[in-house]
Image: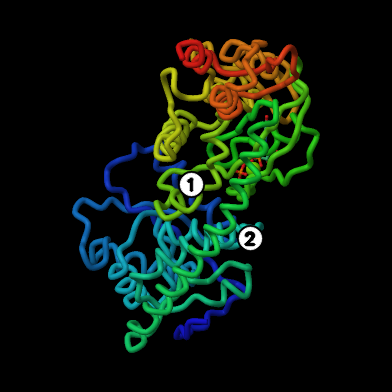
Amino acid sequence: MIPFEKKELDGTDDKALIVHPDLGALNQSALEYRLEEAVGLALAIGLETTSSRYFTVRSPKAGTLFGSGQVQQIKTILAQEGATILIVDGTLSAIQQRNLEEELDVKVIDRTGLILEIFGARAATAEGRLQVELAHLDYQAGRLVRSWTHLERQRGGFGFLGGPGETQIESDRRMIRDRMAKLRKDLSHLRKTRTLHRSRRQKAPWPVIALVGYTNAGKSTLFNRLTGADVFAEDLLFATLDPTMRQSPLPGYDKAIISDTVGFVSDLPTQLVAAFRATLEEVTAADIIIHVRDISHPSSEGQAHDVEQILRELGVEMEGEEGAPIIEAWNKVDLIDPDDPDGVQLPQHIPDNVCLISAATGQGVDQLIEMITETLSRNHKTETISLPLSDGKRVAWLHENGRVIESGQSDGNLILTVQMSNRNWGRFHAQ
Ligand SMILES: Nc1nc2c(ncn2[C@@H]2O[C@H](COP(=O)(O)OP(=O)(O)OP(=O)(O)O)[C@@H](O)[C@H]2O)c(=O)[nH]1
Ligand SMILES: [Mg+2]
């Protein structure tokens, strides 16, 4: 345990003030949704918000990000509202965080820190916890800020947001480094085991379908509907953290494997993208990706954009032959009221790879399943071929790149029924 210098806050009724530094990237309404989202993020670790507002930052100050007049204003608001935590919905350097804490005399946390704290409280599997702790330490390593360890006790997070006193910095850094090295080792061990599981599963003749999307889009609700599972689905940001896989019947197939994954959010900390890369390998290995979108959300477009960017960062091919086909499930259509002139409306043109659904009511889910099987069969073909028993190389290639559904022998030949993407069949026949 790292001997952090503790600053006890009255943990039972901490309330947060949220300020967003407006650097000019967002328009008025996007700013408002961003603030709303930040309130949701705070709530995800049980923090109530006194108010949320943005400050226009024309030239960010190296020491405090906000200008000195703004810092005074924030100080006044904190006192007026009785907030004991300041959430800055943006990125703070370690220095900025510390200076703000000193000037305002409250705990200060930035967006990355907040998301890390949520993930710390939510991760349930051994691997998830190791990954989050690693990401946390990575973020922590350069930070010399006061401790917030009460959150660890209260909310089950890791509470690494705090930091060492000046005198202990060096030894603490060393301890952090050592701990990170140990975590990496444990993780690589766990991953080896998981890869073994996966390669065994890859040989199973079932397609893998990955659900991805912005947090709160309805992935888990859809997952439950498709699989009859009862996964935690809540109006809570980052309700799901650890990926879950289930079997589900799919017309024309014995079964399919559907995986529910962690939701994405704009400005997902790079430490976390890196940490979850391995878990999200399920997505990269999927036969079909279902991008679940909350189409009733006013920022739906921007959210889709963020999701696509994170998928690219994860190495998922978004267009062309190489990647898995992507279907967009435009969810929550039940919330769209075509007669409401102020409400969100569906766009005029709806692309071919889109299915309108309501995971809550079940509307459109049958069409979605149809679209999934259609897309699968369009992109995959099943062939029965005969190969000489001695052709071990080609047999191994087929096992590696396709799904061997049936295998038998006749007259010294191996008869294989294989399902594989059209592209792989092309490669096979060209050999
Ligand atoms: N009205 C309506 N609400 C829905 C629909 N689908 C999901 N919801 C609600 O949206 C909220 C979020 O749903 P989840 O399934 O937990 O969302 P998620 O994408 O798994 O979220 P994270 O795990 O947090 O990333 C819940 O309150 C659901 O009941 C829908 O089709 N219509
Ligand atoms: Mg979920």
**Spatial separation of the CA atoms under disc 2 and disc 1:** 16 Å
Mark 2 lies on a secondary structure that is helix
Where residue 308 sits, quadrant-wise, is top left
Instruction: Decide which of tag 2 and tag 1 comes sooner along the chain.
Output: 2
Q: Out of 11 and 134, give the one closest to the viewer.
A: 134
Mark 1, Cα crowd under 10 Å, few <14 / some 14-19 / many 20+, is some
Q: Out of 75 and 90, give the one closest to the viewer.
A: 90
Q: Is residue 60 above or below residue 387?
A: below
Which residue is drawn at the image coordinates 46% and 78% (left, top)? 147
Q: Is residue 137 above or below residue 145?
A: above
Which residue is drawn at the image coordinates 65% and 12% (left, top)? 386
Q: Say whether residue 294 is visible.
A: no
Mark 1 lies on a secondary structure that is loop
Q: Report x, y in % for residue 67.
A: 23, 62
Mark 2, Cα crowd under 10 Å, few <14 / some 14-19 / many 20+, is few
Where residue 209 sits, quadrant-wise, is top right
Q: Say whether residue 402 is visible.
A: yes
Where residue 246 sits, quadrant-wise, is top right
Q: Out of 190 and 92, give the one closest to the viewer.
A: 190
Q: Out of 150 and 142, give the one closest to the viewer.
A: 142
Q: Name the residue type under label 2.
A: Ala
Which residue is drawn at the image coordinates 36% and 38% (left, top)? 28
Q: Which residue is mark 2?
A: 126
Left or right: where 238 falls relative to 25: right
Q: Which residue is mark 1?
A: 277
Q: Report x, y in % for residue 42.
A: 54, 57
Q: Is residue 76 above or below residue 345?
A: below
Q: Is residue 392 above or below residue 35?
A: above
Q: Report x, y in % for residue 107.
A: 44, 72
